[in-house]
Amino acid sequence: MESGEDSVLRCRAVPQTPLFPDVDSSLNGECNRGEHQQANGGNHVTSNGTIEVEQVISKKLQLKRKAEFLKSDLMHQLDSQVNDFMDSLIEESAILEPAPVPAAFSPPLSDKERSKLRCCLATPTSLSEQSCTKNQMCGVSAQRTHFSHCSLGHIHTHTHTLFSLWKIDLLVTDVSPFFSFRYFRPPHGQGKEFVSRRSLLDELFEVNHIRTIYHMFIALLIIFILSTLVVDFIDEGRLVLHFDLLVYAFGQFPLVVCTWICMFLSVLLVPYSLFHLWAQTQSGSYPHPRLCSWLFGSVFLLYQAVGVGFLPTYVVVTNSFPPASCFVIILEQVRLMMKAHSFVRENVPRVLTWAKEKTSPSPVVPQVSQYLYFLFAPTLVYRDKYPRNPVIRWGYVATKLLQVLGCMFYAYYVFVRLCIPQFRSISLQLFDLRAMVLCVFNSILPGALILFLAFFAFLHCWLNAFGEMLRFADRMFYKDWWNSTSFANYYRTWNVVVHDWLYYYVYWDFLWISQKRFRPVAMLFVFTVSAVVHEYILAVCFGFFYPVLFCLFMCFGIMFNFILHDQRKGPIWNIIMWTSLFLGQGVIICLYSQEWYAQRYCPLKEPSFLELLKPRSWSCQRGVMEDSDRL
């Protein structure tokens, strides 16, 4: 009886802590058996049961001492790393505090993330079960990108109640790679994350209310077609179904196809071959790998500037391609240059890491098929593999391509009914404020329609069609930019494909080179690159230099990014954003259309360089000429 009572007392004296589940369960099992035997008489408890309980208690005490030792060792190793990380956070907060400049390239925190951040940055004395619950803690079950900051805050005061030995090992496994990588650029494959998801409009069109808006645009297209047919029937006495504007805009199409094939084959062969040869020089068999890197890098930059940059532009200019054919070549030129840069930028760090660690007999070079798939894939960020859909829905592909064709005809009727009559019949004269204001406001409607058509035709239909044919599963080519209450959010969500490239290869690489300094300068550099490329495309395709879009980017774009930033919430800011967007589209359509007709009404026989830079619409005073029906 005494041994049974002693075992019961020992069982009741054992603290019920959640540290060691396996030991606790075995110990509880012993205690339950002892209590059950005591309830049935208690005479069957032997000294072996007492010895087993004592052994379990001693084993648990040993494990506790071992955990305390590992805890102190872990704290000694992580203290410096946590301090460095917190210092960098404080430094970044101090840089970001004066002005919300990087807002266009970093998404705002949600309310849930803010609560996590408050919990994580709280002092140890203020951390409690009420202020930082399990759902708020950034533990192992939370997203890995948050790296368990809250759990690190609890280590100092509650390690004996939070971790068993296996939990400590798991925490070290999760946290150590983050603290060991001290650069801004994440390792290869951890920058842009590709996941399987549908395009937003595909989901919204399943709602009847949203699909009705799509039907309204189709009805407007039918009205444009009917108005054109009725006017032509009244003027000509018959139905006129010619599409002279489309035929003119896509002129010289066979030469366009040949130019594109040559450009594509060169981008397929030259960057991949240069990278493959350079990777071989890093194996250690060559005496000067750094010199080889400089040599191959210079050859690649020369190819980008001359082979992809200058030659296609020279073909376009010398052959006087019409506007739509110019857009095909120049947009493809920019796309292929960005893809070649991404391929090299993503794979060079892998080869350099292999050259330093020599983890395999030869460097890991992507296969030609992977690079070829990337050249066609609707993304500008290279990965060896992308999420893929199991099947190709050819009906979906046909629908999207037909929608692209429909948008082309839609744009044709917008120009024919709303743009060409207004600007062809205007009497060109010196700058007049009243005429300019009327021109801008009359151009808002066609400008808004062109904006919607360009977005729907390219970012939704065209990219989804190619994504479906390639079984490319990540269809987030855009986000809900129409709900933006700030231009910072609009820049991030309008064209996600281009934004990702600018974010990872311009913005973050600039910060990496400047060692985390000059964030406003990095932001300004991104705006400058985007504005220069947009203005280059328009200048080559229209055949004249008129930096309207560049000024809108560099002046109003940056200004609105400061004024209409992510802290602006509410419907009124969405209205202001849309108003500014419509006015900008009206200015673009008005000024570029006036300059287009001025270039044809007032041609210069032997223009000087300064005359080419000066807008012709500022000095052209001629009226409508006999050939004013020509574009």
Image (spheres, rainbow, N blue to C red):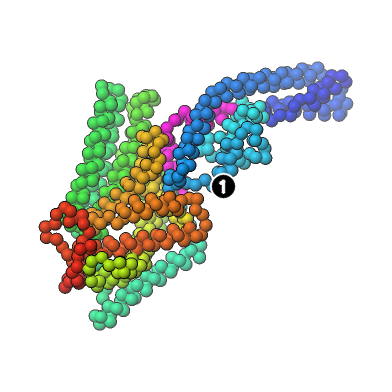
x and y, in percent, of residue 254 in the image: 20, 57
**Residue 76 relative to residue 470: left or right:** right
| Membership of 265 in magenta stretch | no
**Residue 263 relative to residue 339: left or right:** left
Residue in the picture at 67% in, 22% down = 64
Q: Is residue 32 above or below residue 59?
A: below
Q: Which quadrant is the N terminus positioned in?
A: top right
**Residue 599 relative to residue 337: left or right:** left
Magenta stretch in the rendered image: 168-197
Q: Is residue 31 above or below residue 583?
A: above
Q: Quadrant of residue 429?
A: bottom left
Q: Is residue 595 above or below residue 73?
A: below
Query: What residue is shown with label 1?
Result: 111
Q: Is residue 238 above or below residue 204?
A: below
Specify the amino acid type for callout 1: Asp
**Residue 429 relative to residue 145: left or right:** left
Residue in the picture at 41% in, 35% down = 516
Q: Quadrant of residue 265?
A: top left
x and y, in percent, of residue 337 in the image: 28, 44
User: Crowdedness of circle 1 by 10 Å Cα count: few (<14), some, many (20+)?
Assistant: few
- Asked which secondary structure carries label 1, the reply is helix
Is residue 280 visible in the rendered image? The answer is yes
Is residue 387 visible in the rendered image? The answer is no
x and y, in percent, of residue 568 in the image: 49, 53
Residue in the picture at 29% in, 49% down = 532
Residue in the picture at 49% in, 47% down = 108
* Nearer to us in this view, 425 or 58: 425
